[in-house]
Image: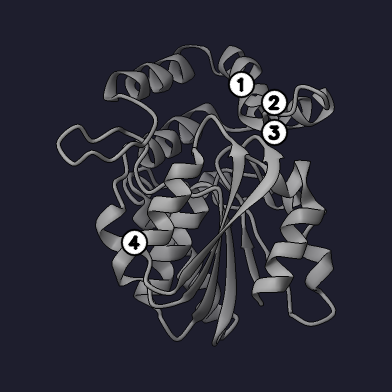
Amino acid sequence: MMFAHGFGCDQTMWRLVAPGFETNFGVVTFDYLGAGGSDKSAYDRDRYASLAGYVSDVVEIGRELDLRDAVFVGHSASAMIGALAAIREPDMFSDLVMVCPSPRYVDGPDTGHRGGFSQGDIDNLIRSLEENPLAWSASMAPAIMGTPKDPMLGAELTESFCRLDPRIARDFARAIFNADNRADLPNVTARTLILQCRQDILAEVSVGEYVRDMVPDSSLVVLDATGHCPHLSAPDQVVAAMRGFL
């Protein structure tokens, strides 16, 4: 079972979920380039200009470990990265768990798709990240965590955001928030579980419903949780939903 973190995070964010599966699975966690203990000097801006570079990293890890019929658990951006990896290597990943996914953050007035943001919103978000990464982290992380009754979680995410290399963070944010993976979803053959929170500023329940409707063999569980990081704010619910699926 491979766990992949989202933007601004690292593999430690799975500490409340991953151990629950170590009895029955070989568990793999890792840091994307630029996060955690990764070698930031190896960063290649061209490679990571889109999600494809991160997909290639996941596939390379899978090949190195000789994974077959593995379970990929991806949070946020990694949900789409995992979907693309499963499409590229269908024998590598037989099951996919998407935690708070969004295939397209920008609203599509031409298609009726609701991603939750206008292109202007996304442009302003990335611009503010470029201009003042620390201020951006301090304002955005607590809102993304979405747990005002537990400010320590927001503080943890803020600290995680602040550890990012600003250049890598900007490029990753641009790759994530400008991506459009809607057309890829029908090509996912892995059995898929979608976990969505009942209130999330980045991915509404309707987004999870859209992903469920577009991925052929998929099911949706709406967690009784708020925010974009239920693996930290509601880990017991995440573990229970995953166990029921697996």
**Which label belongs to residue 137?**
1
- The answer for how far apart the CA atoms under marks 2 and 1 are is 6 Å
- The answer for how far apart the CA atoms under marks 1 and 4 are is 33 Å
Q: Which of the pair 132/215 is nearer the observer?
A: 215
- The answer for how far apart the CA atoms under marks 1 and 3 are is 9 Å
Q: Which of the pair 164/183 is nearer the observer?
A: 183
Element class at badge 2: helix
Element class at badge 3: helix
The type of residue carrying mark 2 is Thr
Asked if the residues shown at circle 2 and circle 3 are in contact, with their CB atoms under 8 angstroms apart, the answer is: yes
The type of residue carrying mark 1 is Ser
Residue 189 showing in the rendered view: yes
Sequence-earlier tag: 1 or 3: 1
Point 76% across, 64% down: residue: 240
Q: Nearer the viewer, mark 2 or mark 4?
A: 4
- The residue tagged 2 is 158
Left of 71 or right of it: where is 115?
left
x, y percent for residue 66? 56, 86
Q: Nearer the viewer, mark 1 or mark 4?
A: 4
**Which label belongs to residue 214?**
4
x, y percent for residue 148? 76, 22
Sequence-earlier tag: 1 or 4: 1
- The answer for how far apart the CA atoms under marks 2 and 3 are is 5 Å
The type of residue carrying mark 4 is Met
Sequence-earlier tag: 2 or 4: 2
Q: How many marks?
A: 4
Q: Residues within 10 Å of mark 4 (few under 14, many from 20)?
A: some
